[in-house]
């Protein structure tokens, strides 16, 4: 087992650390699918406003690659469809219908999911689990016919505010094992299982899966760091990353034929009254959650972040790849400042602070990269290694820079240009 | 998460100037106490000139008015001799602030420290003027500010060590009298506030070593065998080293890119 100690990168302030026990009592009344985490995705809708859907029903497809489907995370009625700029999907909101019996789940899949090698991508595509994968470079959902050179399963918590993957995997160990086995049949190369230090995540690894231990700063929990250490992605080496809870969902789908929208998430942060794990679903309504989980009155007085305090963003619904909700004070650096502060403070120029050098755990030169991104120089950014990065990897730079620039956003623009060139 | 760094990010470039201003207070106070009234006049003129140009540019560019020029004025006031005609100070500082900083878009956008440019122009244009030497008391007063700037990450220890070592080694190599304390005293103020200036110094870690070594070597070269090292040598070394800083960074970037290409095959 390979071990990696990550010394660069920031640490999450340990306020409101989650108790690692799953609370079963949480109720979800509303959830949404959004394309906010899926750059460049434009939906082709399969449902209409007001239509009733069941868990696992396909609600939309990728307009460019219609094989890639997206499934409803709960049974109910489609109560809103908001289209964002450039025909992206701001939110497709599904609300639990009080009059109906919501437990009537979709009948199990009529496929034999264990037999052949070729079947797995088809099953995942058809059942809405393909979006669980993200590629490096570019951080997009892989093409339906693509075969990766390696797959990295991220089961590193990154901070004590996130759920402990051991607790979550112990909840459904069989599904996790089947999921891992399925992954080995998707990739040319190895499947890496990245985990926290301590006891092994599962006792016996399936053949073709290699374990790696990542410890240190919060950057240890970023897939970008793990891929950089294990199997550096580049123009010629495509690596996929997948979260451990999605591996459980894949295993569950292949074992039982049911779409598993359930996710164990942590509700943590300085404003959380009872920081702990709860059983929830993909895209759950965070405002409703915050209303019961924070003391601040009204609930809007606290910032709700989907994700951790460093890489998370203010959101109304849980992000597709997040297992963590951070309830924090309104003056969070990611939030908006106002009044005297904004008049006094000029956030314009980039100051090459020493701290930037230690902010990211990947061997890129931060200041030259930030300069290239600021002016949108895609060629220079590629030379400087931006293909190894996605938004979450450079979040620390935005947090530390005196310019106030959002390097995640700038990086995405550059990656879009490079992806277009590569296609 | 390093609190000091996020604090600076939160306050932006204004925070950077405030921190540098705080760091400058002790040495400036010592210089003022030691030199009395004529130095106060220099300081007042310098502050007036720097803020005049900054305000003028802010109005012309329809930007909020800033006070970054204050640190430039403080640094220049420490270095100028008390018998310098006020018009010479005005011209040198005006050119330095405008050419070194404001035409690039303000604080943080240029590649030279405006104080370095002002002082270099002063010595070039009025060679008889000369710069004031740094007293040991002033050098000592630099320490608290240097520690503050180091904690905030506004100056880099690589540059400091690189410059000090190179200055010492090259002095010894030239057969000059080289007492480390004397060298440190002569360098302290210029090193922390001119050579280490975050926008003038190199911005990659290997580049910072090269930059520091270059600055230290140039100091030894320009001192021309005079002890203690004259302030002019420090100012010229800062000017020349920061002119080469972007090139140094560029070479580091090329090296990094070549390594990445080799690994990716």
Image (tube, coloured by chain):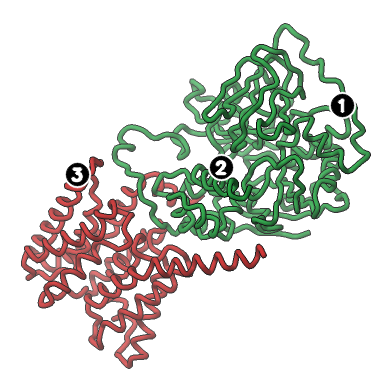
Identify the subunit bearing mark 1: A
Visual hue assigned to chain B: red
The residues tagged by marks 1 and 3 sit, at their Cα atoms, a distance apart of 69 Å
> Is residue A271 shown to the viewer in this render?
no
Q: Find residue A104 and report its image quarter.
A: top right
Visual hue assigned to chain A: green
Residue that carries the numbered disc 3 in the rendered image: B60
Image coords of residue A322 (percent x, y): 64, 36
Residue that carries the numbered disc 2 in the rendered image: A311
Tag 1's secondary structure?
loop
Identify the subunit bearing mark 2: A
- Callouts 1 and 2 close, C-beta under 8 Å: no
Write the residue at 85% across / 53% down. A208
Q: Which-is-in-front pick, marks 1 and 2?
A: 1
- Callouts 3 and 2 close, C-beta under 8 Å: no
Looking at the rendered structure, the number of numbered marks drawn on it comes to: 3
Image coords of residue A363 (percent x, y): 57, 60
Residue A9 relative to residue A201: left or right: left
Write the residue at 48% across / 51% down. B2
Q: Earlier in the sequence, mark 1 or mark 2?
A: 1
Badge 1 crowding class, 10 Å Cα cut-off, few under 14, some 14 to 19, many 20 or more, is some
Tag 3's secondary structure?
helix
Residue that carries the numbered disc 1 in the rendered image: A109
Write the residue at 55% across / 56% down. A382
Q: Which-is-in-front pick, marks 3 and 2?
A: 3
Identify the subunit bearing mark 3: B
> Which quadrant does the N terminus of chain A fall into?
bottom right
The residues tagged by marks 1 and 2 sit, at their Cα atoms, a distance apart of 36 Å
Q: Find residue A182 and report its image quarter.
A: top right
Write the residue at 58% across / 56% down. A361
- Callouts 1 and 3 close, C-beta under 8 Å: no
């Amino acid at each position: 087992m390979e071990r990696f100690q990550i010394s660069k990168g920031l640490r999450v302030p340990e306020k409101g650390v989650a108790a690692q026990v799953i609370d079963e009592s949480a109720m979800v009344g509303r959830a949404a699918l959004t394309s906010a985490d899926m750059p460049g995705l434009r939906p082709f809708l399969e449902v209409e406003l007001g239509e009733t859907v069941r868990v696992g029903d396909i609600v939309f497809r990728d307009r460019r690659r219609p094989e890639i489907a997206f499934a409803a995370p709960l049974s109910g009625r489609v109560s809103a469809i908001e289209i964002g700029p450039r025909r992206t999907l701001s939110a497709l909101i599904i609300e639990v219908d009080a009059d109906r019996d919501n437990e009537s789940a979709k009948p199990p899949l009529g496929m034999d999911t264990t037999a052949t090698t070729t079947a797995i991508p088809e099953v995942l595509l058809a059942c809405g689990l393909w979006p669980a994968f993200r590629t490096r470079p570019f951080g997009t959902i892989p093409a339906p016919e693509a075969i990766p050179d390696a797959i990295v399963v991220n089961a590193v918590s990154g901070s004590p505010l996130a759920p402990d993957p051991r607790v979550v995997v112990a909840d459904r160990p069989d599904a996790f094992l089947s999921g891992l086995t399925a992954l080995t049949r998707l990739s040319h190369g190895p499947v890496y299982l990245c985990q926290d230090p301590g006891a092994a995540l599962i006792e016996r690894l399936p053949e073709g899966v290699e374990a790696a231990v990542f410890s240190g700063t919060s950057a240890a929990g970023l897939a970008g760091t793990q891929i950089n250490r294990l199997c550096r992605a580049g123009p010629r080496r495509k690596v996929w990353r997948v979260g451990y809870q999605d591996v459980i969902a894949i295993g569950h789908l292949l074992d039982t034929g049911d779409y598993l929208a359930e996710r164990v998430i942590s509700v943590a942060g300085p404003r959380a009254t009872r920081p702990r794990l709860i059983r929830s679903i993909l895209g759950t309504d965070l405002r409703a959650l915050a209303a019961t989980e924070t003391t601040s009155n009204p609930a809007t007085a606290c910032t709700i972040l989907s994700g951790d305090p460093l890489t998370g963003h203010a959101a109304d619904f849980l992000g597709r790849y997040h297992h963590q909700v951070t309830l924090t004070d309104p003056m969070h650096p990611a939030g908006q400042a106002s009044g005297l502060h904004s008049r006094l403070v000029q956030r314009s120029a980039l100051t090459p602070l020493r701290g930037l050098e230690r902010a990211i755990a990947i061997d890129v030169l931060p200041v030259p990269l930030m300069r290239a991104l600021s002016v949108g120089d895609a060629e220079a950014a590629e030379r400087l290694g931006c293909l190894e990065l996605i938004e979450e990897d450079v979040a620390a730079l935005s947090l530390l820079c005196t310019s106030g620039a959002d390097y995640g956003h700038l990086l995405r623009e550059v990656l879009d240009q490079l992806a277009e060139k590569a296609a | 998460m390093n609190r000091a760094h996020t604090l600076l990010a939160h306050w932006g470039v204004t925070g950077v100037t405030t921190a540098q201003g705080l760091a400058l207070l002790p040495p400036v106070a010592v210089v003022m106490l030691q030199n009395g009234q004529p130095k106060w006049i220099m300081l007042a003129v310098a502050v007036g000139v720097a803020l005049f140009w900054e305000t003028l540019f802010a109005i012309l560019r329809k930007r909020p008015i800033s006070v970054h020029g204050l640190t430039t004025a403080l640094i220049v006031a420490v270095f100028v001799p008390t018998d310098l005609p006020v018009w010479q100070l005005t011209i040198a500082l005006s050119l330095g602030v405008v050419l070194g900083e404001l035409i690039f878009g303000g604080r943080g956008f240029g590649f030279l420290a405006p104080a370095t440019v002002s002082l270099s122009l002063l010595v070039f244009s009025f060679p008889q003027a000369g710069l004031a030497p740094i007293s040991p008391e002033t050098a000592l007063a630099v320490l608290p500010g240097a520690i503050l700037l180091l904690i905030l990450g506004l100056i880099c220890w690589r540059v400091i060590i690189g410059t000090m070592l190179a200055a010492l080694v090259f002095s010894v190599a030239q057969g000059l009298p080289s007492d480390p304390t004397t060298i440190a005293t002569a360098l302290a103020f210029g090193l922390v506030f001119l050579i280490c200036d975050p926008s003038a110094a190199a911005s990659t870690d290997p580049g910072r070593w090269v930059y520091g070594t270059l600055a230290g070597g140039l100091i030894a070269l320009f001192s021309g065998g005079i002890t203690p090292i004259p302030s002019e040598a420090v100012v010229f070394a800062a000017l020349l080293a920061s002119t080469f800083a972007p090139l140094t960074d560029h070479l580091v970037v090329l090296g990094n890119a070549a390594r990445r290409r080799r690994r990716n095959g």
